[in-house]
Amino acid sequence: MPNHARGEVPLAASHLTMFVDVQGKLLFHTVVAWEDDFTGYVIDYGAYPEQRRALFTLRDVQKTLGRAAPGAHPTRTSTPGSSSSSPSPSPARRSAGRTSRDSHP
């Protein structure tokens, strides 16, 4: 059991890290405080949109990003054989404008 309240950063902690797991329907997040010796404390965690229940899986979420922000679309990366609204630039386009000093051995 933690000896600090949710949202409270222990005095010994010197760093904070936030993790966000981006899914198509939901964002999972965790905030962790760290001491210099890598002792970690979970400060906060949850999902957006908030599900308002203790246990759920991605498959059975009731509130989704699509419902929370209608009309918003995630950035998409195309893969070979798929269509996308934001295709990745071709290798030739990515390398355009590079000089020999830009390339790495």
Image: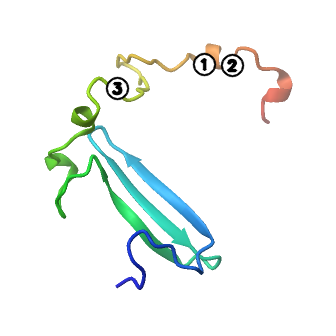
Q: Residue at x 33, y 42 (%)?
A: 23
Under circle 2, the secondary element is helix
Task: Return the disc, 1 or 3, that comes first in the chain's sequence.
Answer: 3
Q: Is residue 20 left or right of residue 48?
A: right
- In this rendering, the count of numbered labels is 3
Q: Position of residue 78 (x, y in %)?
A: 42, 23
Q: Amino acid at mark 1?
A: Pro
Relative to the observer, which residue lies in front, 50 or 24?
Answer: 50
Q: Position of residue 31 (x, y in %)?
A: 45, 62
Structural distance between the alpha carbons of marks 1 and 2 = 6 Å
Q: Label 1: which residue?
A: 91
Under circle 3, the secondary element is loop
Q: Residue at x 52, y 78 (%)?
A: 10
Q: Is residue 51 left or right of residue 12?
A: left
Residue 95's label in the rendered image is 2
Q: Residue at x 60, y 76 (%)?
A: 35
Q: Label 3: which residue?
A: 73
Mark closer to the observer (3, 2): 3
Relative to the observer, which residue lies in front, 72 or 59?
Answer: 72
Task: Return the disc, 3 or 2, that comes first in the chain's sequence.
Answer: 3
Q: Amino acid at mark 3?
A: His
